[in-house]
Image (cartoon, rainbow, N blue to C red):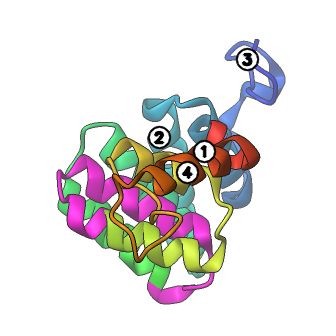
């Protein structure tokens, strides 16, 4: 059994008596595990629960539901809409930018993905997920000496040193 994940036959696995917040938390656990179909089911239940109880849907829910829709092969326009709605409610959450950037990357819109990751990195310049995704997209750091060409031997040498000294690049 995965830590934090309820077993289907256990009493704790009975999802019929869960609160909206518990559905949300369970969905976030599934997201962390990469269990996208379970995540979308839990997050959708959470969203419906909030709507039924006429409570405001948390921005976090919309952001992760958008990510989950895209990772589950769903409608990318809907995924982008949900992630953008989350950012409209709270634009100071780096993870919301991370989720939207990943959705743009899944939609093959590299330009918007890079722009979104850059906005998120302005809030948290050490965000490992965004740095990793930028690297996957082929985006490199500026050369050490910007007044010299990237291929200049000093930039190459200083870049190697910077890479060895910066542990956040080693992921």
CA gap, disc 4 to disc 1? 40 Å
Residue extending farthest front: 153
Q: SS class of the residue under badge 2? A: helix
Q: Residue at x 33, y 37 (%)?
A: 72
Crowd around label 4: few <14 · some 14–19 · many ≥20 (10 Å):
some
- What residue did someone put label 1 on? 27
Per the image, is 110 magenta?
Answer: yes
Callout 1 touching callout 2 (CB < 8 Å)? yes
- Quadrant the C terminus occupies: top right
Q: SS class of the residue under badge 1? A: helix
Residue 143 seen in this snapshot: yes
Residue 70: x and y in percent read 31, 47
Per the image, is 169 magenta?
Answer: no
CA gap, disc 2 to disc 4? 45 Å
Q: Is residue 151 above or below residue 122?
A: above
CA gap, disc 1 to disc 2? 8 Å
- What residue did someone put label 4 on? 159
- What residue did someone put label 2 on? 41
Q: Earlier in the sequence, mark 4 or mark 1?
A: 1
Q: What type of secondary structure mainly makes up the magenta span?
A: helix
Q: Earlier in the sequence, mark 1 or mark 3?
A: 3
């Amino acid at each position: 059994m995965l830590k934090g994940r309820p077993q289907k036959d256990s009493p704790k696995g009975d999802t019929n008596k869960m609160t909206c917040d518990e559905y949300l938390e369970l969905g976030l656990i599934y997201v962390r595990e990469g269990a996208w179909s379970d995540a979308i089911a839990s997050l959708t239940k959470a969203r419906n629960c909030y709507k039924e109880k006429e409570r405001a849907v948390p921005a976090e829910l919309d952001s992760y539901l958008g990510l989950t829709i895209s990772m589950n092969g769903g409608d990318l326009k809907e995924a982008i809409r949900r992630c953008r709605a989350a950012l409209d409610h709270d634009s100071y959450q780096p993870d919301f930018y991370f989720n939207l950037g990943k959705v743009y990357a899944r939609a093959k819109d590299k330009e918007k993905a890079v722009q979104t990751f850059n906005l998120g990195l302005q809030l948290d310049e050490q965000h490992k997920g965004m740095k990793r995704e930028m690297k996957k997209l082929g985006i490199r750091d500026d050369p050490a000496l910007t007044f010299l060409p990237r291929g200049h031997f000093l930039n190459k040498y200083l870049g190697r040193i910077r890479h060895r000294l910066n542990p956040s690049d080693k992921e």
